[in-house]
Image (cartoon, rainbow, N blue to C red):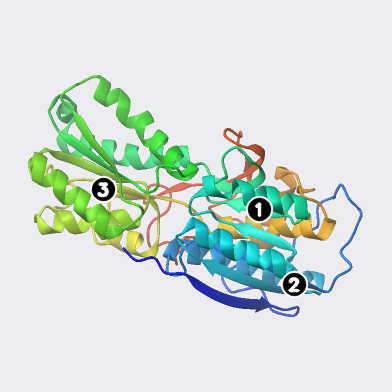
Amino acid sequence: MTWRKTLFVGAVVAGLTIAAGCTSTQPPTPAPAESTDTAAKSEYNIALIRWDSNDVFFNGVQAGEEEEWARIAKEEGVKINTVAFGSNDAAEQTEALKAQIAKGIDGVSLVSYRAEAMKGVLAELAEEGIPVVTHNSFVPGSDQTYVSFDGVKAGELAAQAVVDTLDKNRGKEWREGNGVFIELRCLITLSTDVDRHNGMHKVIDPIMAANDKLEIVIQEAECDGEKGRTITDDAISKYGIDRILGIMTIDGTAAVGGAIPALKAEEAIYPNTDPKYIPVASVDCSKPELDSIIAGELTECSEQPAKGEGIVATHLLWDMIKNKTLKPTLTVDQVQANMTAAYGEQPWLPVVDIPVNGFTGQWYGIQSFSTPGDLAPDAPGHWAE
């Protein structure tokens, strides 16, 4: 597979209105800051380092970032220039970020493709006094300000949807059979992948421990539909379609681009109340996933709120830039208050304190939720609407 990198520039200037879709156009009441130092500059340059520019989820994240930068620019009366670099290659991400550091930047929003490769870059940013917010996947072993949802909870929601559907359609007798689960992971070194995987296994492992005839196929699909399709096809070929119990995917692309097409090829898409129905659950909730739920194919998606992630990460980054600090002056409660004041009630709120494990710093957590369990796929409030 050939990865593409794209360099694209966007500028947000003072006077722009907040993008449509917000429930309120009133800016938040600024929370008390630990520092009284204010920014003297009138123009700021921000580097956005993210996954490939064609990645639907990270386009949603960037949309949230741009919305919040526009709101900040209007409120503060400043000009904010964002330079976004998208690549699914750690070396290219690192090279692009170092080039931006050399040109002069005021802050960095960082979504690492291979987070473990970014330790040196974070250390360099700290030495240069450049604030950075990591989000989606943290850089292991490093000190950082991090924004993401609770991936363990998201994994639990996905696996529970599969189990509940099987119980409803087949009774609990399936637990005593010799069926097979398929789990399509993304990148097993990413913290978000690990968390979702662990959440899924909090649900699945006790069931499998009670019956050693149950099996699970776990493979890395790299968030790629074609690879997800190949893995699913191979599992069906090895075990037979009748033994496949359910499919859980760490991301949405492997579900709608891999698992679902593989089931269609076997003519194994049944009404979701049919005992032969094979439940498929994913994490992300992109538009293709929502459409697949409506079509009766995908069972459930645990929503990773892309726009909310971008908004909160940007809010924290500006706090550090404005107050000339490398750590936010805002507490979790203050961020939550500011987000509610600016955006009203959102399904990705409240912002909460998630215990840190694997890095040092503060984790500003946003909310995952189940579709259709908590929010119908055609209801307002999804990041992909």
**Rendered image: mark on residue 133:** 1
**Rendered image: mark on residue 385:** none
- Which badge, 1 or 3, comes first in the chain's sequence? 1
**Count of numbered circles in the view:** 3
Q: Residue at x 36, y 54 (%)?
A: 223
Tell me whether the residue at label 2 lies in contact with that at label 1, contact meaning CB atoms closer than 8 angstroms: no
Q: What residue is pinned by disc 3?
A: 280
- Kindly identify the amino acid type of the residue bearing the numbered disc 1: Val
Q: Secondary structure at mark 1?
A: strand
Establish if 197 lies above or below 111.
above
Q: What residue is pinned by disc 2?
A: 73
Residue 84: % across, % down: 58, 69
How far apart marks 1 and 3 lie (CA) works out to 33 Å
- Which badge, 2 or 3, comes first in the chain's sequence? 2
Query: In the figure, residue 353 lies in which quadrant?
Result: top right
Q: Residue furthest right?
A: 36
207 relative to 373 in the view: left or right: left
| Residue 170 seen in this snapshot | yes
Q: Label 3 neighbourhood size at 10 Å, few (<14), some (14-19), many (20+)? A: many
Front tag of 1 and 3: 1
How far apart marks 2 and 1 lie (CA) works out to 19 Å
354 relative to 58 in the view: left or right: right
115 relative to 296 in the view: left or right: right
| Residue 307 seen in this snapshot | no
Q: Residue at x 41, y 35 (%)?
A: 199
- Which badge, 2 or 1, comes first in the chain's sequence? 2
